Image (cartoon, rainbow, N blue to C red):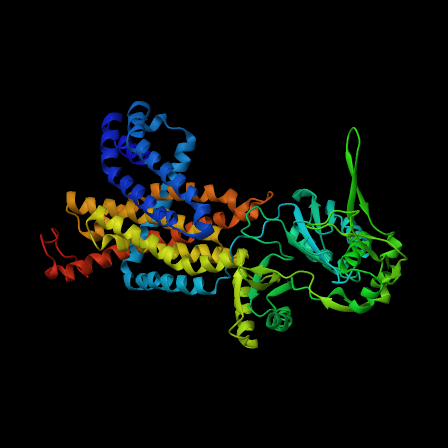
């Protein structure tokens, strides 16, 4: 708006006349840009799953901002230009204006010469346009795909896993050895260590370590690099494994796993699940795209079965309840009292000395007193009082046969069926798309029974859902923009001319992601959606002016589009540079968590750079080609004929 008003002001019009003429000429262009930008955001409002919930507020906020900006541009900006702008004569202009204006005139003269050359080679230019469309589709297929970028938030979560039959004391010792190795790393500031069964550690052989890193500018590696550096040193500790993953700001996990991504298999037959899980884990660990494959199937726990010789126990006067009470008193940590003080309270727990509870053989030293018939209890039970004990204590081994077996530490369920969750990290340079394909190939290779149902969970499941909807989301945005532009221009042809600028933006965005080593994530997809709205402004500015020149000044299409290219070059460059420079801080950011925002800036910058270079030349050629095509089909037109003469081919 300001550039168009200033152009009339420089031509000698008064500020008021310049504001009226400039706003009148550019008003429809601003309306077209605004409506088409909002139309691009409409598909974001209907995205499903977690992605839709994340970006719905983003789309609404951006749409309202665009609408308010258009209102200001159409009302307040012309009024301020009429009051504040003044025409300055040549002698009143400063040295800086003269230098920059001279440079701009040389640039526009060069652009004019190159446009004339392009218009003489329209067929080759059309091949370039179609080539960018094909290249966009090819790059979309081959680009590595992910869900969210891996962030460096300065915190690493480690899940430790020891043998299933480990004791608490041994687990504590090995966990401390892990902590000592981690604290020796130069980039680690502190850590917190947890073992024992709680809401997160569901089994006694697992633990957690939260590693706090130094600030990013004080480290020479990111969190993923530090994990790779720590792994060889931690692997030297026998009897325990530490699985590490960077803590993320955005997570969609609904269960705790040892590594970052999850894949579950469920079956109504737990025995069949136990048989096939090790085979699948073995194959997955050999897959190049996967690292740190782990499973929550822990079947190596120790269990001792006590078989009571009821005849012998009956002769000795020993009831099963007495056996149960004696064992619970010795090993069950029965709470027998609470000691209250002025500041705290302490639970008194009954148990044998730790030296008598190291191995299952300690039960050979347990004695049980025969029970009398008088019901009484020294300890609470659920529904009935236990009989009192009397007489000479009898060794437990006299009437009980002990047998040690293995048993699962936990049996997890998903819905009503047993489930095993496999978790994995990505290999360096691998994308989540590569990992999901590798898992699906392994699943087909080992040919698991049809009764076993496999599915991705958490982030991996959300990635698959978003991957399947990405093409439809982009297509919906393009169709929406086409319909809106068709209504605005009352044409089937001009919207296609405007949309012809999009493939170059797609090529630039995807190439920028591949060059910088980033995956096509959900954040990058949002950047591509925004590019659809930003890039088409070049064509809208050119086509609006060319159509006006054809209608008002009766110029032939080639002359009209050439003049539009020259007069709209400055505002096109201004708006493109403003958007490009706005995306640079996102693309170059290096603060904590910047990895989440970086793909958005990279796609915007890469897409604008390439599309700006190509659309300045391809748009006029596509415009003329569709204009000729419209005249060839003019005889099929229903309604009034096209007013101007058919140009020479």
Estimate the x, y position of residue 608 in percent, counting from the top left.
Answer: 42, 49
Q: Residue furthest front?
A: 373
Which sits in the foreground, 309 or 122?
309
| Image position of 109 with respect to 299: above or below | above
Outermost residue to the top: 83
Q: Is residue 137 in view from this perspective?
A: yes
514, 242: nearer the viewer? 242
Task: Confirm whether residue 574 shows in the render.
Answer: no
The residue shown at (37%, 28%) is 93
State which quarter of the image contains the N terminus.
Answer: top left
- Residue 333, horizontal then vertical, whole percent: 78, 50
Horizontal relation, residue 10 to residue 106: left or right: left
* Residue 516 point in image, percent of width and height: 54, 55
Q: Quadrant of the C terminus?
A: bottom left
State the count of labels: 0
Depth check, front residue: 170 or 408: 408
Identify the residue at image location x=22%, y=33%: 21
Q: Is residue 141 left or right of residue 340?
A: left
Residue at horizontal 34 percent and vertical 60 percent from the top = 129
Please determine whether, in this image, residue 66 is positioned above or below residue 364.
above
Q: Is residue 127 left or right of residue 183?
A: left
Residue 278 image position (x, y, % from top left): 65, 71
């Amino acid at each position: 708006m300001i550039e168009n008003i200033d152009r009339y002001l420089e031509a000698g019009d008064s500020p008021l006349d310049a504001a009226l003429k400039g706003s009148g000429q550019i008003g429809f262009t601003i309306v077209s840009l605004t409506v088409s930008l909002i139309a691009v955001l409409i598909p974001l409002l209907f995205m499903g799953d977690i992605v839709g919930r994340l970006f719905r507020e983003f789309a609404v906020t951006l749409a309202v901002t665009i609408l308010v900006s258009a209102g200001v541009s159409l009302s307040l900006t012309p009024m301020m230009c009429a009051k504040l702008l003044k025409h300055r004569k040549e002698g009143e202009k400063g040295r800086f204006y003269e230098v920059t204006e001279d440079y701009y005139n040389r640039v526009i003269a060069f652009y004019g010469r190159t446009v004339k050359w392009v218009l003489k080679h329209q067929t080759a230019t059309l091949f370039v346009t179609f080539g960018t469309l094909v290249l966009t589709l090819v790059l979309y297929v081959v680009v590595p795909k992910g869900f969210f970028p891996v962030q460096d938030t300065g915190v690493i979560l480690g899940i430790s896993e020891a043998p299933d039959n480990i004791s608490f004391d041994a687990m504590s010792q090995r966990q401390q050895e892990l902590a000592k190795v981690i604290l020796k790393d130069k980039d680690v500031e502190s850590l917190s260590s947890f073992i024992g069964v709680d809401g997160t550690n569901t089994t006694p052989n697992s633990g957690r370590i939260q590693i706090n890193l130094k600030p990013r500018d004080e480290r020479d590696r990111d969190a993923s690099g530090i994990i790779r550096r720590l792994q060889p040193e931690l692997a030297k500790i026998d009897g325990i494994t530490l699985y590490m993953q960077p803590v993320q700001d955005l997570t969609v996990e609904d269960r705790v796993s040892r590594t970052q991504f999850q894949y579950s298999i469920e079956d109504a037959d737990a025995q069949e699940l136990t048989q096939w899980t090790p085979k699948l884990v073995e194959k997955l660990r050999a897959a190049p795209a996967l690292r740190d494959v782990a499973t929550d199937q822990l079947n190596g726990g120790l269990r001792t079965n006590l078989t009571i010789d009821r005849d012998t126990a009956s002769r000795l006067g020993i009831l099963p309840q007495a056996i149960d009470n004696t064992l619970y008193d010795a090993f069950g940590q029965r709470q027998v009292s609470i000691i209250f003080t002025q500041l705290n309270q302490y639970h008194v727990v009954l148990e044998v000395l730790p030296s008598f509870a190291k191995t299952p053989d300690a039960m050979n030293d347990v004695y049980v007193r025969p029970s009398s018939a008088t019901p009484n209890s020294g300890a609470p039970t659920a529904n009935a009082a236990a009989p009192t004990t009397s007489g000479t204590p009898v060794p437990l081994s006299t009437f009980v046969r002990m047998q040690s077996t293995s048993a699962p530490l936990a049996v997890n369920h998903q819905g009503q069926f047993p489930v095993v969750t496999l978790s994995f990290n990505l290999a360096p340079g691998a994308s989540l798309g590569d990992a999901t394909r590798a898992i699906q190939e392994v699943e087909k290779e080992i040919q698991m029974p049809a009764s076993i149902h496999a599915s991705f969970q958490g982030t991996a499941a959300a990635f698959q859902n978003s991957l399947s909807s990405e093409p439809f989301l982009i297509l919906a945005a393009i169709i929406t923009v086409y319909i809106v532009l068709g209504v605005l221009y009352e044409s089937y042809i001009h919207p296609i001319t405007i949309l012809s600028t999009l493939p170059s933006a797609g090529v630039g965005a995807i190439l920028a992601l591949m060059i910088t080593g980033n995956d096509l994530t959900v954040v990058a997809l949002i950047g591509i959606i925004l590019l659809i709205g930003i890039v088409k402004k070049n064509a809208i500015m050119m086509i609006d002016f060319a159509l006006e020149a054809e209608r008002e000044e009766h110029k032939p299409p080639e002359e009209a589009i050439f003049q539009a290219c020259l007069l709209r070059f400055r505002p096109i460059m201004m708006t493109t540079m403003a958007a490009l420079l706005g995306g640079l801080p996102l693309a170059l950011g290096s603060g904590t968590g910047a990895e989440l925002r970086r793909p958005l800036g990279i796609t915007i910058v890469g897409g604008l750079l390439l599309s700006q270079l190509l659309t300045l030349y391809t748009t006029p050629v596509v415009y003329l080609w569709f204009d000729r095509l419209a005249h060839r089909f003019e005889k099929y037109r229903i309604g009034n004929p096209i007013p101007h003469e058919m140009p020479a081919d």
